[in-house]
Amino acid sequence: MSLVNIISAIGNNSSIYPLIVRDCGIENPAKIVMTYDQNLKDSKQMALNATRERLIDEYGTSIIWLGGIPAVDAICNFGIKKAGFNPKINANLLKENSKQGLKYNIDKFKNLAPNEVKEMEKVLKNKSLYQKLLAGKFVLSTGIPIALMGYFLPKSNFALTRKIKKKQDTMKPILENAGSAENPSFKGLTSSLANMSTVNKMAITDGGLTVGRVGTARNKFEKLEMGFKMSMMMFLNFVAPIWIAKGFDSLSNIIFKTNVNLDPNLLNDKEFIKSIKNNDLEMPKNNIIDFLDNNAGSKFSKLAEKYCDVKYLKNGIRDPRAFVDENKIKKFQKEIEKFAQQAKASGNIDKFAKKALVAKSANIIANVGICSFLLAVALPKITFILRKKVTGSDAEPGLVTQPDK
């Protein structure tokens, strides 16, 4: 994997790769070290207990958070296939419009993709059951990780601490668990939720995790700290990176007159740059879907397949089971047109593309660095300061007896 591919991956805030880098590579180790140092101010034994809990909590949560949703999704897809349906059929197609939909695509592709159409016809005849299966998949893929992260993991971690502390004569027993909150309810869930990306599902599980961690906290001070910390982590993981990326990209456009809203892999694509120089990159003028269907082998269609989730079958026919997000493609096309216009105006397209690649890569690295610093250093420091002000102690609030008042 090339350096540009790595930068592209960690710069895609719609994927899990930035979360893996921030969570496992930077945030977790930093938090563990800072937890030890902070609790060492109370005692070495407190520091060891707190560090052990933090190590289990952070990496246990990361494993479930990052791997749980894809794993449960795979199991659910297996079950859906056993029920006789293909889970690749996008739930958005259940809503018919003038350009695509289940019935529309069946009629359009019945001679072009007969096998795929048969799968779609089965869904059409059993629409209600398919919607229920997709809704069940969403509930399981978010509910199981929430239960594991929010309830099972902390309770097991606390139980281990209680067992160890019974053997530690110099420490007082910690409070017994105060109980847990009820499982979140997913009433009114519709099949459209099944189209959520893994990252969006992770954001939902993070919300459930917050509820679970507050509910299983051992006293009111630990509840307050968990509520604050988990809420800020959600913001810094899912909102701040998008804001920062937009800010950096806008600054690059203003300061350097360089559009860097494209993926680094595309900015490094020699064929793409060649098409800009030769002015032969044909793009949709009106109907995007018709263009994709009639020009499957074109450069733009291949780019839409790579960057806009358009799917083609092996025979070159667009997959009728997949939904085409026209708004996403329109935005992508607009960014390409803006880049091409600036590149041509610069007088040296190759040099402009290299400058754009460097600027975009720098923006991504800076974004990851800032968010990682906020998550791994700033947030724990602020949490420790607030803990000291509220509890009067440097120790983890769940490891000391703090009577509720």
Image (cartoon, grey):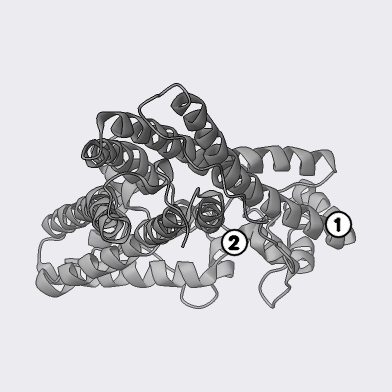
Front residue of 271/389: it is: 389
Identify the secondary structure beneath mark 1: helix
Q: Is residue 328 left or right of residue 274?
A: right
Can you say which quadrant of the picture contains the N terminus?
top left
The image shows residue 368, relative to residue 347, as above or below, that is above
Q: Residue at x 62, y 59 (%)?
A: 195
Q: Amino acid at mark 1?
A: Leu
Q: Residue 82's quadrant in the figure?
A: top right
Label pair 2/1, CB-CB below 8 angstroms: no
Q: Amino acid at mark 2?
A: Asp
Q: Position of residue 92 (x, y in %)?
A: 67, 65
Q: Residue at x 50, y 34 (%)?
A: 157
Q: Is residue 96 left or right of residue 55?
A: right
Residue 274 appears in the picture as rendered: no
On residue 293, which mark appears? Answer: 2
Identify the secondary structure beneath mark 2: helix
Q: Residue furthest right?
A: 125
Label 2 vs label 1, nearer the camera: 1
Instruction: Return the residue at label 1.
Output: 129
